Amino acid sequence: MPAGASRYLDIAGDLRTRILSGEWEPGANLPRMTDLARRYGVNRDTMARAIAILEAEGLLWAVPRRGTVVRHGMSRPRRPRGNYVKRNEGTDEPGYSFPSASAQEVWVHHVPRTAKLEKLTDPRLARMLGVPEGTEVMRRHRVTGPAGEPPFQTNDSYIHPRGVADAPEVAAAAAAPGDW
């Protein structure tokens, strides 16, 4: 190894190759940090630096009390949601994901989804919807993300009463996130 080269870079490269080759399936845990350090003949700090590189690349995710989890085969770029969505291809059910997610990931609801009429008490939202404060509007609440990962997206939608009258199905609770 040339002078100044760090062992953790070599370990990160080896782990990257093993992950991308499918040795560990998405959602699987890597062996414990101490076991990996022993296998590579390094201390735990060196192993942690290698893992940190792959976590920054989006290939791994250190989850407290669960271990180091293999992500879904690609990094999850950090970028605004925007208006672009794509259909989930990992299931036959309706659903969508956003640019920072893989179309192969199956997204799930992390808490029970709700869709109910409630009085709008936020004056700013009332102005945005063009209704008087206190008007009943449909509020849809969703907390979603890939299966096996912590929630990735929280969504509260407020739907104008005309929208509910024209499309009452907005209150339906479909099986998959992004159903409407």
Image (cartoon, rainbow, N blue to C red):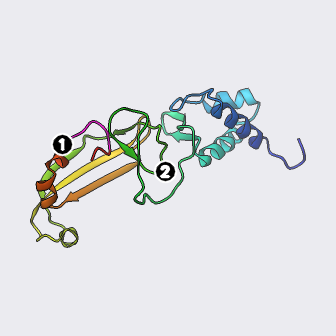
Residue 174 is one of the magenta-drawn residues:
yes
Instruction: Characterize the magenta stretch by its predominant secondary structure.
Output: loop
Q: Residue at x 86, y 50 (%)?
A: 4
**82 lies above or below 180:** below
Residue 20 is one of the magenta-drawn residues:
no
Residue sitting nearer the eye, 128 or 71: 128
The stretch in magenta equals: 172-177
**Left or right of residue 85: residue 170:** left
- The residue type indicated by label 2 comes to Ser
Q: Give the farthest residue toward the front.
A: 166
Horizontal and vertical percent for residue 124? 22, 72
Question: Of helix, strand and loop, which one carries label 2?
Answer: loop
**Left or right of residue 71: residue 169:** left
Could you tell me which quadrant the N terminus lies in?
Answer: top right
Pointer 2 with pointer 1, Cβ within 8 A: no
Instruction: First in sequence, mark 2 or 1: give its number.
Output: 2
**Left or right of residue 27: residue 85:** left
The image quadrant of residue 2 is top right
Q: Which mark is residue 100?
A: 2
Horizontal and vertical percent for residue 131? 13, 70
Horizontal and vertical percent for residue 55? 60, 44
Q: CA distance from mark 2 to mark 1?
A: 27 Å
Horizontal and vertical percent for residue 120? 14, 63
Q: Residue at x 34, y 41 (%)?
A: 95
Residue sitting nearer the eye, 152 or 129: 129
- The residue type indicated by label 1 comes to Ala
Q: Which residue is mark 1?
A: 172
Q: Residue at x 12, y 53 (%)?
A: 117
**143 lies above or below 176:** below
Question: Of helix, strand and loop, which one carries label 1?
Answer: loop
Q: Residue at x 43, y 37 (%)?
A: 89
